[in-house]
Amino acid sequence: MSINSILGNALSGLNAAQLGLRSASTNISNVNTPAYARTQANIVSRNVAGAGLGVDAASLTRITDRFLLATSLSANADAAAGGAKATLLDRVQAQFGSLDDAGSLFARLNSAFVEIGSAALDPASDVRRLTAVTDVQFLFDEFARLEGELLTARSEAQRQISFNIEQANSLILQISDMNNDITLGSLQGDSTGAENRQEALITELSEILDIKVDRTENGGAVLRTSDGVLLLGQFPLTIEGPNAGPGDLGQSFAPIQGRSPSGNVVELQSHFKSGALRGYLDLRDQELPALALELAEFASGTADALNAAHTNATAVPAPTTLRGRNTGLLSTDALNFTGQTSIALVDTAGGLVRRVDIDFDAGTLSVDGGAPTAFGATVGNVTTALDTALGALGTISFTNGELRINAAGANGVSLIQDATTPSARAGRSFAHFFGLNELVTSAQPTQFETGIVGTDAHGLGAGGALDFTITGPDGRTAAQISVPVAGVSVDDYLAALNNPATGMGRFVTFSLNGNGQLIQTPVVGAENYTTEMSADSTTRGTTGLSFSHIFGLGEGTRGTRSSAFAIRSDIAANTNLLSLAQLELSPTTVVGDVVLGSGDGRGGEAIQHALEQTRNFQSAGSLSGVASSLSDFAGRFATDVGSRAARALRQSDAAGALKIEAEQRLANTQGVNIDEELALMTQFQQSYNASARLIQAAKELTDTLLNII
């Protein structure tokens, strides 16, 4: 072997040892660096014309496993999505408290009804009346507070969506920049530093949205969503979405989309299957709205249960005026009541002054036990007939959707249901339906069984319209449809709404059930489309109420009822108006008989028992419509709140465990083992020393030859 060959082999050995030492030192220094993949010196035997001439050691490569990396990225996304849901839903659940928590919504519900029962035991006690009224107000204050918490949580979810989009864009841009560094490094023989930095960025991005990674010939990253939509190829895609804002129900959010440098737009929202972004989207669009709708149905059911009993009771002495709520009805609407009820005018001593018995089945009324007279078939007809029946002793009027009864002088007015055949329209008594003597009031309708029939005039002013936004399964807006007021009757307008060409008939149809409740039925093939009312410019007659308010159309109308309730202002100011008594009427009761007593607590007892009486609850969120007691519905709601948080926590824990396992397996493949690196360092150090001795030996041989010459 020539001296030149010895020097060549020795120098190549020195270079190889240097590269190996460099690799080992880099690995050891990055032992605690997240997502770092250890490097390895590429050393191969140099072969020239069949002869071995040292080694080639020109580059470093990263030790990694693309399959394990893909599994780790997927696990990161699932864990981030689960963590986002679990954290926010746990915070929401804490606001509701548990069934046995003294300060929880559920404890306040029981306390309100118990205190009314206590007041009924001692109707003359001002303290018990005040406590009962205060507890009922506290209950509805809690409903309002919890609605605010849910909307705040939804606003937080939207803020996180906006933040995650901004963060994702920054990471994608940095990953794109790293592609250039990797290309340059590969030309120079070492791109491992850029590759490691890029993998750390990709790992961080995987926590925001689910991605998969492909590599170009030069080692650059190509990013796609898990189902294949390109996020980064030659150029990065810019993700666009809604900015942070309020979490109001019924609010439309701009869909998330991607924009290329050339301006082309691609829909992205439906392609995000996991990651923190998907977790917050699910919270904003599904979990939190569902809880708000369930809470609203709970609050409305509570108010309705209290009012059903309170409108069938009376204070002592009876109030001189009973003012109803705005029902949204017109005087021309069909009456649609069945059964019997009685109106009584009572003096301050509880003596009967005037009695009007109404038989809706027969369509007649009788005054003070006299002969029955017919009153017609509309709301206006019965109002006129009742006003005539009261004569100079009182008045009854129906204006702007509101029924009002006034007693003349110092007399009072109260109502009582017939015990055998109670009156009912859409499941509510005459007094209850019109809101006469309600305990809890609301400025807008909160129960949507209207009793309206299709042949009633819709009464909607010309020029009004209902506007809808239809969202497809992919999250994109499929259509925006405006349906102007049409025809004369409710059926006419429903036909316009159901028109497949100009209305909503391609996606959903509307109809009235037997209680006058508006029913939405998805069209076959459009079950996965979401229909939301975006605007309503209609007004029914002089009521001031829109079509959506009357029929409860739209998530915004139904989901914000929890904050709509308050104790009737005059009862809050004077608790003596709390109705704890009931009229004592029988077929033989005549004018002059005492029908009210100051010690009567039967009305209060009926209010207390309303907690356990069966009533109809409508479908809301994930709770299906059911006939149950208020206390049972409270239990169902508490279970749903708790189960959502528990389910999210279980999913988060499972995803977290999978993430740890995936990270560990990836680390076992590409992580740094200090003992191995130290052994390699010793090996390369010895190799370096041996190569240096070869150079020394070659020098000595050269010197000897020169001395001989």
Image: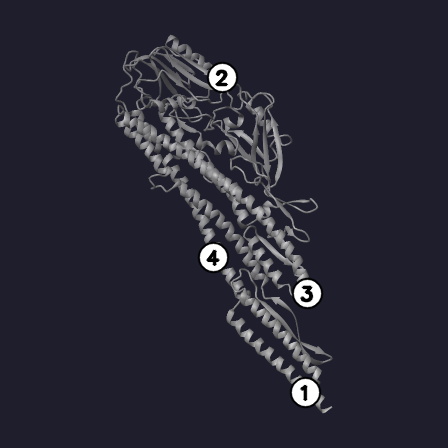
**Residue nearer the viewer, 222 or 177:** 177
Considering only vertical position in the picture, is 272 above or below 402? below
Which numbered mark, 1 or 3, is in the foreground of this view? 1
Figure quadrant of the C terminus: bottom right
Q: Residue at x 45, y 19 (%)?
A: 402
In the rendered structure, are the residues bearing label 3 and label 4 in contact, judged by CB atoms less than 8 Å apart?
no
Q: Separation of disc 4 and disc 2 at Cα?
A: 65 Å
Of circles 4 and 1, the one toward us is 1
Q: Residue at x 53, y 34 (%)?
A: 250
Q: Where does label 3 land, which residue?
A: 188
Give the CA separation, mark 1 to mark 3.
36 Å
Q: Point out the residue furthest to the front here.
A: 707
Q: Label 4 amino acid?
A: Ala
Query: Tag 2: residue type?
Result: Ser
Residue 705 spot, x, y in % from top left: 71, 89
The dot on residue 657 is 4
Which residue is labeled 2 in the image? 331
**Upstream in sequence: badge 3 or badge 4:** 3
- Disc 2 versus disc 3: distance between alpha carbons? 88 Å
